[in-house]
Image (cartoon, helix red, strand yellow):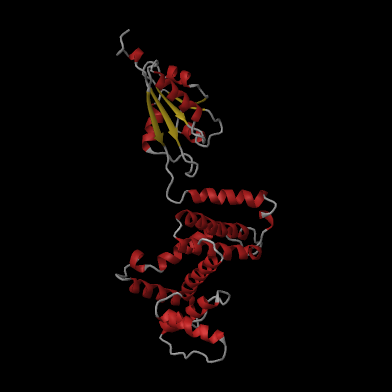
Amino acid sequence: MNATSPEAAPGRIVLLTTSHRVAPGLLSWPAWQALHGADRVLCADGAHPQLPYLREAGITVDEAAPTAEELIDACAGGRTVVVVATGEGEPALTDGLARLAGSGRVSMPALELLPASYDLPGARLLDLVQVMDRIRAECPWSSQQTHKGLAKYGIEEAYELVEAIEDGDRDELREELGDVLLQVVFHARIAEEDAEEPFSIDDVAGGIVAKLIHRHPHVFGDETATTPEEVKEHWLRTKAVEKQRESVTEGIPLGQPGLALASKLASRVRTAGLDVPLPTGEGIGYELLAMAVRAEAAGVDPEAALRVAARAYRDAVRAAEGLSG
């Protein structure tokens, strides 16, 4: 028997991977071709979610977990063996194949990693929803939380996000964005249990998607906007139609920090073209109000400006204490 005879051909191993974030059975065309053309299809997990769909498609799947040596033997004679990988990715098998290939003593089959389904952007959000669902059901602390009880954490996480942005720390920014996202998913999970008006994370996402599309007619519709100012004009106009508010002050949360509140009120007044004199009175409050309105008119965020100054003050204090910044 010569080295080029069919009996001596080393064959082919295809490691087929799938994503649990994609509905089972939705595989790529190359994956279906490999499965239908294989001499043998193996899967170590008899409960693998893909198996019912593969069998429905007429593919025989053997429940087996061969060693690297056994898999190579199964490929002898030029046969193709497809291994449907489990969620862990078959590390023991791939390590064994790598070890044999590195030995130089084995005629190795062709090795191919074939992703049968791919994660779409945002797919990991499904993992977050699943993890939150389990935590809500099984964690003694999380299972008792309410919207009101979590409110303070939402405020804290928002401020920590702002701090990460102002510090320019990319690692902190990524982490704090995750913490803010957790608050959204947590509240949505709690909302599912409301007896009278339940809603889910899908309702939350669906609502903001609809809002974004409606308020961006220059992207999803026939209108045109070429400058940020025109975009803002579109946004404010569609928002006004949606809300049908009687006053420009409606929708402004009065519980936000004072400088931010004053700046937001001034912004609404200026955008509406109203001429509203500032109230007069004695005390630092009225002075701060006037400064916040002046800052907003100049395009300056008074809260951010004060934080910058406060940090400089913090550094001066530390320097006076003989400490580094």
Task: Report x, y in % for residue 108.
Answer: 38, 20
From what the image shows, is residue 159 above or below residue 301? above
> Can residue 252 be seen at all in this image of the molecule?
yes
Residue 301, position in %: x, y? 45, 74
Q: How many marks?
A: 0
Among the 4 quarters of the image, the one containing residue 149: bottom right
When asked about the image quadrant of residue 187, the answer is: bottom right
Viewport quadrant of the N terminus:
top left
Q: Position of residue 240 (x, y in %)?
A: 44, 77
Quarter of the figure with residue 209: bottom left
Q: Nearer the viewer, residue 302 or 109?
A: 302
Residue 236 against residue 12 in the figure, above or below: below
* Horizontal relation, residue 169 to residue 321: left or right: left
Residue lying at 40% horizontally and 86% vertically, measured from the top left: 273
Q: Can I make out residue 200 in this image?
A: no
Q: Residue at x 52, y 24 (%)?
A: 65
- Residue 137: x and y in percent read 66, 50
Q: Residue furthest top?
A: 1
Q: Please name whichever residue, 232 or 200, is drawn nearer the observer in this view of the structure.
A: 232
| Foreground residue among 203 and 131 | 131
Above or below residue 9? Residue 117 is: below
- Identify the residue at horizontal 49%, vertical 64% (top origin): 162
